[in-house]
Amino acid sequence: MLNIARYSKLRFFSQSDVPLRKVMISAPHSWLRNQLDLQDEAQETTLRSFLTQHLASYSFAPGQHILQLAEKIMNPPSVAAGPLATLNLRAQGLDIMWQACLAMMAEKEKQPPVLSSANRQDCERIREFIMANLDRDLTIDLIAQKVAISASTVQRRFKKHYGTTLYNFIKQQRLEAACVALSRDSIPISQAAHLAGYNNTSTFTSAFRKLYGFSPKKMRALGKGDPCRSGSG
């Protein structure tokens, strides 16, 4: 798909020796905006963003349904001859446009939202505070107070940026610290449990095994040089 928002001269060059069979469908901007119900300027959508960018483009592999629609345009059935010819072309063309818009929206909207530069900096400040204070009782309210952001905003931005909740991130980092201490310093498992914030060694062992795939005892036996990072710290 190509959005031509202002007058342009376009040329098509084929880089293949294979004969090209193609269907080109075009529609005026004003008609598209009416059909897509984009009259509300405050409504920010994938389609609105696409239509406001001159020469914005989107490519995708058409499925069998779109290929069949294109074939009906190039080789219309006999029943679509005469007075039904124009209606057939418009019907197939609208269906192709519908399928193309669905494909673009599905691909664009499944991508994670991007935070602004200021919000990313806030998330980095949150992470730095957590990493420097893993031995403290890190509540959401304490973190929010230290970075001067509301508790709900802290949780929302952090999860959006890092893809995990504050609780899970803190839990993982503490387990990672315990893992390093076990591997590097061979500390007792009870001490490692305390370092990770657990009062019960069996609960600690269960959480450790779930994250790393083996027990704290085995990690301590492996000794130095064994990786303790779980992959998302």
Image (tube, grey):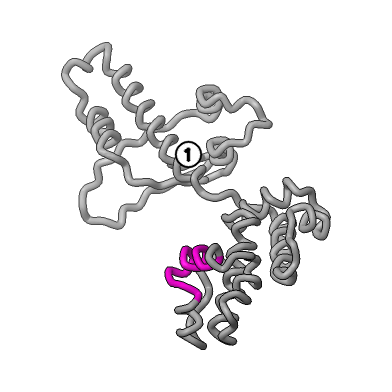
> Is 209 within the magenta?
yes
How many marks are shown on the rendered structure?
Answer: 1
Q: Report whether 110 appears left or right of 83.
A: right
In the rendered image, which residue does mark 1 sit on?
105
Residue range (magenta): 204-216
The percent coordinates of residue 37 (x first, y second) are 56, 24
Residue 231 visible: no
**Farthest residue in the left direction?**
78
Residue drawn where x is 58% and y is 69% of the image: 175
The percent coordinates of residue 100 (x first, y second) are 40, 36
Which of 57/17 is in front?
Answer: 57
**Farthest residue in the top direction?**
83
Mark 1: which secondary structure? helix
90 up-or-down from 2: above or below: above
Q: In the rendered structure, which amino acid carries the disc numbered 1?
A: Met
Q: In which image quadrant can residue 26 be found?
A: top left
Q: Quadrant of the N terminus?
A: top left
The percent coordinates of residue 200 (x first, y second) are 59, 65
Q: In which image quadrant can residue 201 be found?
A: bottom right
The percent coordinates of residue 223 (x first, y second) are 49, 87
211 up-or-down from 92: above or below: below
Residue drawn where x is 62% and y is 36% of the image: 44
